Amino acid sequence: MVDIEAVYIPRKGDSQDMRVTAIIPAHNEEKRIATVIRVLKPLAVIDELVVVDDGSTDETSKAAKEAGADVIRLEKNRGKASAMDEGVKRTNGKIILFLDADLLNLKERHVMDLLRPVLDGESEMTMGVFRNGRFRTDIAHRISPGLSGQRAMLRKVWDSLDPKRSMDEIGYGIEEELQALVKDGKVTLKKVILDGVSQYTKEEKLGPQKGFKLRMKMYRDIINVWTRPFKS
């Protein structure tokens, strides 16, 4: 049954210009991807639901298709930014919703909380912040909320990213690239509390050693964004 709070009633004048595309970048998320897709499927506001399988070596694509999503399969693992970019390039929604593939306790109301400010013209981008979920992820979002991958935005926000920057190089630094647009005054942002939502840690998914290694790569990508020269 669909959460009644999550049902979107189209406003007068809604048109193709308000199409919403949900994009989930995923790498080896076979065991978790269907949970997120099942939250999105009943929402009439979402016109396209796409999983970008970023070169997975497991059955992520199969699990996503079986759960009801369209799948874009990248043969090589190119990183989060490239997966998101491929999703944007191959879809046509004016509003883009990005969600991670490993979320816990996501509800329809959380999705609508992310979308409403953009749909209503209140903000050009929203960013979901975890609260009252799991201690580790709550702390991470209190320290660095800008690293959240849960976002809704106008397509023009994504198009505002520097085209000279390689998405393959940006990788996990993509959220900081988006935050830079906000800091530079180019995009308006509204923070949205995602009460009770959390996600699996890399160590939980991959084990202590592989998870730590991937976490270090994530931090390197983020630091590369922080230290790159910004255009004046």
Image (spheres, helix red, strand yellow):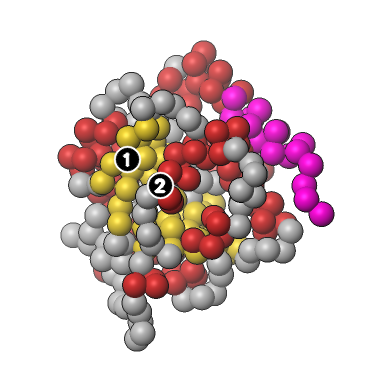
At horizontal 37% and vertical 32% (from top left) the residue drawn is 74
Give above or below for 180 relative to 35: below
Position of 220 with respect to 131 (left or right) is right
Residue 23's disc number = none
Q: What element carries label 1?
A: strand
Q: How far apart are marks 2 and 1 (CA)?
A: 7 Å
| x and y percentages locating residue 218 in the rendered image | 59, 30
The local crowd at label 1, few if under 14, some if 14 to 19, many if 20 or more residues have their Cα within 10 Å, is some
Residue denoted by label 2: 87
Give above or below for 59 relative to 93: above
Position of 68 with respect to 123 (left or right) is left
| Tag 2 and tag 1, C-beta contact below 8 Å | yes
The N terminus lies in which quarter of the figure?
Answer: bottom left
Q: Can residue 191 be seen in this view?
A: no
Q: In which quarter of the image is residue 232?
A: bottom right
At horizontal 29% and vertical 31% (from top left) the residue drawn is 60
Q: What stretch is highlighted in magenta?
A: 217-232
Position of 105 with respect to 175 (left or right) is left
Q: Is residue 48 visible?
A: yes
Type of residue at label 1?
A: Ile
Type of residue at label 2?
A: Gly
Is 130 part of what is drawn in magenta?
no
| x and y percentages locating residue 22 in the rendered image | 37, 54
| x and y percentages locating residue 49 in the rendered image | 30, 52
Residue denoted by label 1: 72
